[in-house]
Amino acid sequence: MNSKEINVKVKIIGKDSNQEKIFSTSLTITLKKFMNIVLEEFGLNKNKIDKDLRYLENIPIFNFFILDSSSEGFTLNLDRNKDIQLKVIPLKYSKKEKKYIELEPEPTIRKRNVPKQIYQLKISIKYISPPIWRRILISNYSTFAELHDVIQEFFNWDNYHLHEFYYYTQDYIHRQIRIQGLDIDGSFSPNLDFYDAREDDIRLCDVFSTEQRAVNYLYDFGDNWQHNIKLEKIFPYKDGFQSPLCVGGKRATPPEDCGGPYGYQEILEIQENKKHPQYKERITWLGGKFDPNKISTQIIKMTPREIEQKFGFNSEARIEKSQH
């Protein structure tokens, strides 16, 4: 088979029709031509195709496989009134089974073979000014579950809300990748429909790279505390390194359940105005006046130059080109 051709299984799924057939087609064929071939083969009326699909008619079908970003293929709605769907699934020939079989979905996040290193990360709570941030040094072999624990510790969160990590791929698709965090009961939900991986199965080095410099961490789906995690530098790993280290930071973490960035800003304004009708109520809820500049986390304060002198190679650390 030509490298520009592909074998696919096409399923027609609907109330009155459940059929499937195998087609060999070019990856560069447009959706319109492909649909004409498929619908004619299945004996379906071309005039009843959902009008929304006509905006996609001239797009080559390989774009749909790329946009899906997996080997699972793609699904199109043919007729909304009759709820008919067309599902296209790529196939490969199995010499062992002597037939075409569906491809196994490729992992969205691939495990990478990289040397052990030290990552310098700057973690900032988004949508708050002046910024609240911590700078940490952590092994690149640490999992995202361990990074979650580190963020909770160094930001002094109470760790009783749901959380997740997510980021956007650095290609033209700019697809969102979501990493599932533990449920409140300390277990993982078996439903991974909305996630690409679990945090205990993915290391930092499997995601962070020269191209992928930023990841987001969401804590508390109600208050919506968004954290930006930026890979600043990579140092060679040194024996005796005690990971993780918090080597810098500014400002106190907001109180839990205060209503997110907007609610936090409101609290700061109210506690400075004794005439505000909610002043006593808020001060009581806070347990006293809240100091936004006090950091309760113990920080080993080191300047960027001191960090490089202690951990850097030839007194100079840099983001190294990743090998995928």
Image: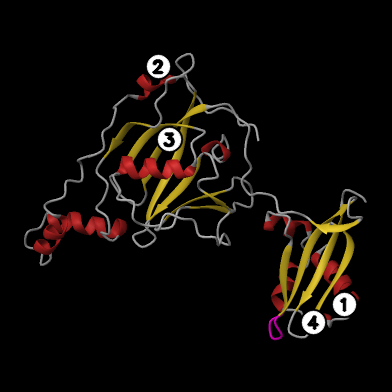
Report which residue position mark 3 lands on.
Answer: 121
Q: Residue 17 carries which label?
A: 4
Q: Which mark is residue 208?
A: none
Q: Give the residues drawn in magenta, as a range.
A: 79-83
Q: Which mark is residue 42?
A: 1
Dot 4 amino acid type: Ser
Disc 2 on helix, strand or loop? helix
Dot 2 amino acid type: Gln
Task: Report which quarter residue 307 is drawn in.
Answer: top left
**Quadrant containing the C terminus in the rendered view:** top right
Say which of 203 and 95 sits in front.
95
Sequence order check: which comes first, mark 4 or mark 3? 4
Direction from residue 112 to residue 178 in the image, left or right: left
Gap in Å between the C-alphas at discs 2 and 1? 69 Å
Q: How crowded is mark 3: few (under 14 residues within 10 Å), some or many (20 or more)?
A: many
Q: How crowded is mark 4: few (under 14 residues within 10 Å), some or many (20 or more)?
A: few
Q: In the image, which is nearer the foreground, mark 1 or mark 4?
A: 4
Q: Residue 309 carries which label?
A: 2
Sequence order check: which comes first, mark 4 or mark 2? 4
Q: Do the residues labelled 4 and 2 touch (CB within 8 Å)?
A: no
Gap in Å between the C-alphas at discs 4 and 2? 69 Å
Q: How crowded is mark 2: few (under 14 residues within 10 Å), some or many (20 or more)?
A: some
